[in-house]
Amino acid sequence: MVFYFKARPEAGDYTIFMGLDKYENEELIKYGFPEDIWFHVDKMSSAHVYLRLHKGQTIDNMPEGVLEDCAQLVKANSIQGNKVNNIDVVYTPWHNLKKTASMDVGQVGFHNSKMVRTVKVEKRINEIVNRLNRSKVERNPDLKAEREEVNAAERAERKHQLREKKRREEMERLEKEQQAESRSYKNLMVADKMTSNKDVASTNKTLQELEEDFM
């Protein structure tokens, strides 16, 4: 079971989601998307909350309001963190999550600690938490199939871009060949179709006869 939430409407169309328990967390870790940002209460047990950014977005340009929604949601879904003020919430891109065989189910580490950021949450804001809970939808997605579908679409897009690149390169090559051929024709002097003054003087034919020959 995965719970889906809608971020504040004024920030745009953003989906926030989290697993029911550590087993769903394990699946979310395994089949995340490159656009996903992971949230967790620092040094406390909490839900694993994810934000799916738009294509082309990064952790550097996510809206502040959406960041606050995610931080409030993860605090509200921490038994200990929900009871205290001034907690830290850590967040990082999904691809920075590290999973090793020795870790428990749902447990994660980081590939690069420098990519982990922290936001301070002073207190629970019920207005935000209640709004998010009203938008909650429960689903049983096939996370593996969703990830494979995205992978297939990305492969198809890469193939399309490669074909377009080869087509443009071929068109540029043909255009250069045509331009080179055109320049060579302009500079070409065909001797048997031209008559110099010296050639005229060396013949006994009159100018009129030469013109008639040419015609």
Image: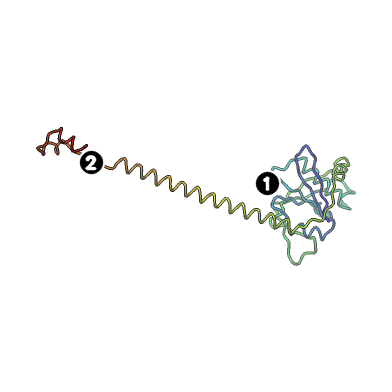
At x 77% / y 64%, what residue is drawn? 103
Q: Disc 2 marks which residue? A: 193
Q: Is the N terminus in the top left, top right, bottom left or bottom right quadrant?
A: bottom right
Q: Position of residue 53 (x, y in %)?
A: 72, 46
Q: Disc 1 marks which residue? A: 55
Along the horizontal axis of the image, is 150 left or right of 200? right
* Mark sitting earlier along the chain (1/2): 1
Q: Are marks 1 and 2 in contact (CB under 8 Å)?
A: no
Above or below 107: residue 205: above
SS label for mark 2: helix
Could you tell me the amino acid type at mark 1? Lys
Q: Tell me, what colour scheme is on the image?
A: rainbow
Q: Position of residue 13 (x, y in %)?
A: 75, 42
Q: Position of residue 197 (x, y in %)?
A: 15, 35
Could you tell me the amino acid type at mark 2? Lys
Residue sitting farthest toward the left:
204
Residue sitting farthest toward the top:
208
Viewer-nearest of discs 1 and 2: 2
Q: Residues within 10 Å of mark 1 (few under 14, many from 20)?
A: few
